[in-house]
Amino acid sequence: MVDLGQLANDLDRDETEMLVRSMRNPAYKVVSLKPEREERKTYDTRMPQPRKYASRATRQAAYRQRTKLSQDSLLTQRGLPPGPAIPSMPGTARWAAAIKRSESLIVMVIEEMQEYHDDRSETWQEGPQGEAFLGRLDELQELSDQFAAIGE
């Protein structure tokens, strides 16, 4: 942040007023009242940032490493093994784990839906909504059986 008190000491009143106006309104253009040949003081106190990487290639390699670690951590959070070391190599272990996890999720949904169906009244269960609900439940059971057959 620029210290306005220091600027006021270094500049005359008219220039200080113009500088304050330009800081409040970016569209306001500052025009210097001093002749151009006089050397102007600069008040930019920012320092250049040190380079983190020696070249663009090392920067790109670091980016690839960070993204790979991020993707691997997402897979482990989901309970899946990390991807294969070589991208063109199939990740059969990862795929098998994903299928098993999908199967367990479908089993969980089936159990919850069955409990919901059992908690409803007999008139609802025998009505058209109950019949449609049982149809969806049967379809999910068939899907669960297909997942079990794939996992074997």
Image (cartoon, grey):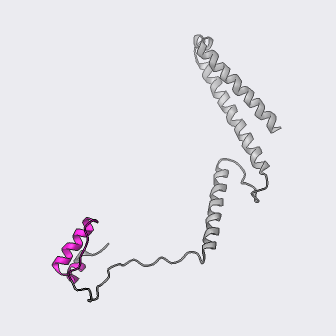
Residue 130's quadrant in the figure?
top right
Q: Position of residue 89 (x, y in %)?
A: 79, 55
| Residue 43 in magenta stretch | no
* Prevailing secondary structure of the magenta residues: helix
| Residue 17 in magenta stretch | yes
Where is the C terminus found, in terms of image quarters?
A: top right
Q: Residue furthest front?
A: 36
Q: Position of residue 141 (x, y in %)?
A: 72, 26
Where is the N terminus found, in terms of image quarters?
A: bottom left
Side (left or right) of 134 relative to 26: right
Span shown in magenta: 6-33
Which residue is at a point 74% across and 41% down the rendered structure image? 99
Circle count? 0
Q: Is residue 61 above or below residue 40?
A: above
Q: Residue furthest left?
A: 13
Q: Position of residue 75 (x, y in %)?
A: 67, 51
